Image (cartoon, rainbow, N blue to C red):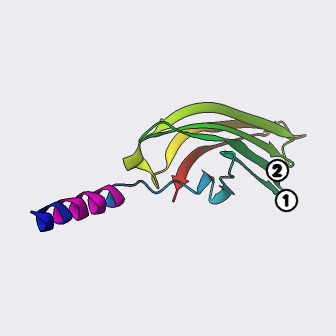
Amino acid sequence: MKNSILLALSVFTFSCAANQDVEPKSVTLIYDQSKLTAEIQADDHFEAHVDNEKERIDLSGTVKKLHPDYQLDVSVIKASKIKHATNQINTSLVIKQRDLEKPVLIGGVYDHTVVTDENDNVEVTESASIMSVKLSQ
């Protein structure tokens, strides 16, 4: 009887330890052909920046545990230094535990430019970029 109780207690303890979720440690913004990763701080906030000759990207927000899922509040500001344009995305989403490590689309930017030269030749350029985030363990 004593061995049965110890065996049951051992199995219960092992199964509880095995079912513990590993908390996410970072948030990654995926945009164009680049990635920006921010570590999640002890107060559940995250923040990261890129600033180069072409653009400035600000990524910030919070992650809240919803047992077993997560609420992600994210803000992305992308400023192009070449086109002198700024785009901003602010959103909240729920990330399921099973969807950790999977990118989630949060928005996109479509750019349509028409340029006319001195000879009245028209040049049209179009581009699109998407932004995704993922929680990583």
- Residue furthest to the left in view is 1
Q: Main secondary structure of the magenta part?
A: helix
Q: Residue at x 33, y 61 (%)?
A: 18
Q: Is residue 77 above or below residue 26?
A: above
Which range of residues does the magenta coloring cover? 7-17
Q: Position of residue 105 (x, y in %)?
A: 52, 41
Left or right: 18, with 37 as reference point = left
Image quarter for residue 116?
top right
- Residue under label 1, please give it: 52
- Quarter of the image for the N terminus: give it: bottom left
Residue 116 in sight in this render: no
Q: Residue at x 53, y 54 (%)?
A: 24
Q: Nearer the viewer, residue 119 or 62?
A: 62
CA–CA distance in space, label 1 to label 2:
6 Å
Q: Is residue 14 magenta?
A: yes
Q: Is residue 68 above or below residue 6?
A: above
Residue 63 in sight in this render: yes
Residues tagged 1 and 2 counted as in contact (Cβ below 8 A): yes
- Residue under label 2, please give it: 56
- Residue furthest to the right in view is 118
